[in-house]
Image (tube, rainbow, N blue to C red):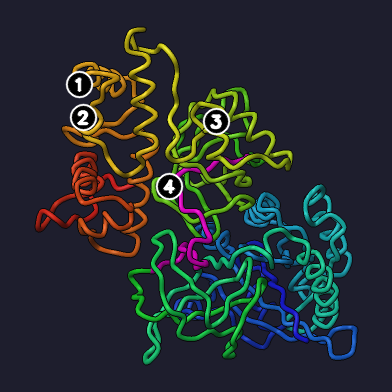
């Protein structure tokens, strides 16, 4: 039986990571002509090696992800960490710990890597006493991280020193990582998810994507889609480590041949997942860990770079009041994410690592950052407690829960007492209507006359509790945000959107879709460039 794990490299530029992988596997992970010309890893590289196990017939296939060490390619390095079971932390004997050594160690720790091996390379360039001293320094610097008590191996790709020992250590780490993974909540039982790290075409085959399958399994009959655009496709072929396979499981490097999908419809940072098996959102509730090396003040509302899975998007960070480690991230582009996903935050400019953390839940729209009920819910999630689904929480608490479709109902604010019942009724029916917009004429009733309804609508709009869609239709802020996020996700895989397509993806009627076009145009999320029934993305697309 072949068992699979993913190993990765980390460490400062020119410390011999790629040479080490090539020595272990016989494969050069540097695949780009520029990398070979400059002798510098720029993007992710991939290789693998088969190791025999301790039991008869047992075989391990270790897939390597070789990451760039240069500070300019930190975002590539972070995308490569996704799905790693064990990391080879590489330090050159003749240079020791360098700036990216510290940064990579910090990032790996924040991303929750649990198992590592200290590998000292280029030992032919230093005397044994100096190497012993260096290993002691690494252990001291790495105290309290995933490298606590990690094995240390001295190597030289020039002389072959330590390579056999490193394979033995890898074999032991593979067994321990595989056992740990079998109880990992993200792995076999969860829906299939593959963050895309490469997209390319091959003549006669079409579009091919690669990545590490971080949960679930895929086979030739899997019903998959590209997210966040939710673009379904047929799986033409499936490979793992250069071999055609009929099925792949979590922990394997996988290449998927996508039928009827062009390379402008799928990108690094997208996620291949079971249809309906992943949330797409522009709002994340998270628990933060600030890097010990970040010296600036972390301010609510600051613009940041979010690196999650293989995706890299801009966002703003909003801190919950009196809870410096709980926050909402408001993304400028939607992502496919799930609770438990790890991420890294980097300062907008200059690019410095702020820290990172873990996703507690995906959210539907903006929150009040002082909402005690939301804070209590996130605290419970952080403790690992089971809580009711977000939608149920909002319905039972009677307030804003940050999930799509739920509306905050704060009594009295800017609403005269004689209009309160009408206002509450209007909030309820607009919340329940979803994407099916209601005109003033349609909601006129015996309970409230049309003039009172119009007065309430104006007051609710002024107070931010309803959003005007066009001249005669309103909706909740949550529904409006959901429309913007859904349309932005559509544009990840398409150049334009028609009125009929908007109607279908929102599951609404043509009249409502036409009104939402007017709203999106006004917000400059879409723009009319051709006929009245077609839109392209606007300058303010989420």
Gap between marks 3 and 1 measured at Cα: 41 Å
Kindly indicate the quadrant of the structure image that contains residue 172: bottom right
- Give the camera-side residue of 248 and 276: 276
The x and y percentages for residue 207 are 40, 80
Residue at (26%, 46%) from the top-left corner? Answer: 525
The x and y percentages for residue 311 are 48, 58
Range of magenta residues: 266-287
From the image, tell me which residue sits under label 1. 450
Gap between marks 1 and 2 measured at Cα: 7 Å
- Residues under numbered marks 1 and 2 in contact, where contact means CB atoms less than 8 Å apart: yes
Q: Residue furthest left?
A: 531
From the image, tell me which residue sits under label 4. 314
- Residues under numbered marks 4 and 3 in contact, where contact means CB atoms less than 8 Å apart: no
Which comes before the other along the chain, label 4 or label 1?
4
Gap between marks 4 and 3 measured at Cα: 17 Å
From the image, tell me which residue sits under label 2. 440
Gap between marks 2 and 4 measured at Cα: 38 Å
Residue 282 in the image: above or below residue 165? above
């Amino acid at each position: 039986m072949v068992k699979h794990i993913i190993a990765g490299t980390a460490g400062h530029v020119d410390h011999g990571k790629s040479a080490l992988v090539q020595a272990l596997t016989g494969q050069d992970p540097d695949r780009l002509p520029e990398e070979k010309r400059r002798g510098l890893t720029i993007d992710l590289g991939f290789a693998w090696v088969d190791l025999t196990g301790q039991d008869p017939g047992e075989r391990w296939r270790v897939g390597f992800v070789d990451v760039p060490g240069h500070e300019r390619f930190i975002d590539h390095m972070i995308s490569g960490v996704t799905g790693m079971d064990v990391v080879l932390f590489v330090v050159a004997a003749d240079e020791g710990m360098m700036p990216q050594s510290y940064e990579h160690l910090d990032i790996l720790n924040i991303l929750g890597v649990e198992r590592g091996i200290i590998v000292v390379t280029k030992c032919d360039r230093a005397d044994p006493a100096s190497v012993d001293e260096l290993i002691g320094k690494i252990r001291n610097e790495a105290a309290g991280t995933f490298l606590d008590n990690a094995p240390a191996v001295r190597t030289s790709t020039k002389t072959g020193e330590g390579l056999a020992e490193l394979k033995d250590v890898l074999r032991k780490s593979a067994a321990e990582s595989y056992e740990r993974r079998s109880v990992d909540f993200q792995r076999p039982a969860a829906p299939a998810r593959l963050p895309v790290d490469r997209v390319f075409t091959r003549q006669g085959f079409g579009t091919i994507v690669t990545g590490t399958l971080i949960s679930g399994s895929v086979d030739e009959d899997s019903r998959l889609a590209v997210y966040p655009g939710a673009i379904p496709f047929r799986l033409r072929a499936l490979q793992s480590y250069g071999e055609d396979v009929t099925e792949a499981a979590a922990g394997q490097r996988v290449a998927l041949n996508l039928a009827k999908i062009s390379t402008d419809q799928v990108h690094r940072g997208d996620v291949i997942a079971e249809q309906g098996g992943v949330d797409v959102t522009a709002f994340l509730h998270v628990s933060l860990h600030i890097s010990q090396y970040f010296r600036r003040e972390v301010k609510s509302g600051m613009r940041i770079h979010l690196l999650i899975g293989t995706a890299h998007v801009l966002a703003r960070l909003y801190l919950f009041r009196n809870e410096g480690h709980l926050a909402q991230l408001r993304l400028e582009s939607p992502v496919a994410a799930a609770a438990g996903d790890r991420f890294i935050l980097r300062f907008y400019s200059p690019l410095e690592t702020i820290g990172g953390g873990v996703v507690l839940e995906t959210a539907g729209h903006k929150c009040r950052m002082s909402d005690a009920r939301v804070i209590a819910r996130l605290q419970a999630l952080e403790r690992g407690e089971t809580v009711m689904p977000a939608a149920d929480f909002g319905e039972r608490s009677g307030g804003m829960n940050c999930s799509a479709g739920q509306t905050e109902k704060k009594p009295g604010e800017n609403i005269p007492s004689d209009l309160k019942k009408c206002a509450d009724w209007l909030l309820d029916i607009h919340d329940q209507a979803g994407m099916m917009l209601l005109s003033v004429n349609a909601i006129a009733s015996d309970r409230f006359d049309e003039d009172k309804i119009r007065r309430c609508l104006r007051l609710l709009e002024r107070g931010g509790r309803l959003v005007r869609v066009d001249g005669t239709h309103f909706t909740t802020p949550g529904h409006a945000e959901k429309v913007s996020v859904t349309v932005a996700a559509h544009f990840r895989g398409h150049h334009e959107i028609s009125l009929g397509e908007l109607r279908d993806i929102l599951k609404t009627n043509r009249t409502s879709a036409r009104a939402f076009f007017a709203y999106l145009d006004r917000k400059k999320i879409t723009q009319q460039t051709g006929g009245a029934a077609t839109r392209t993305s606007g300058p303010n697309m989420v």
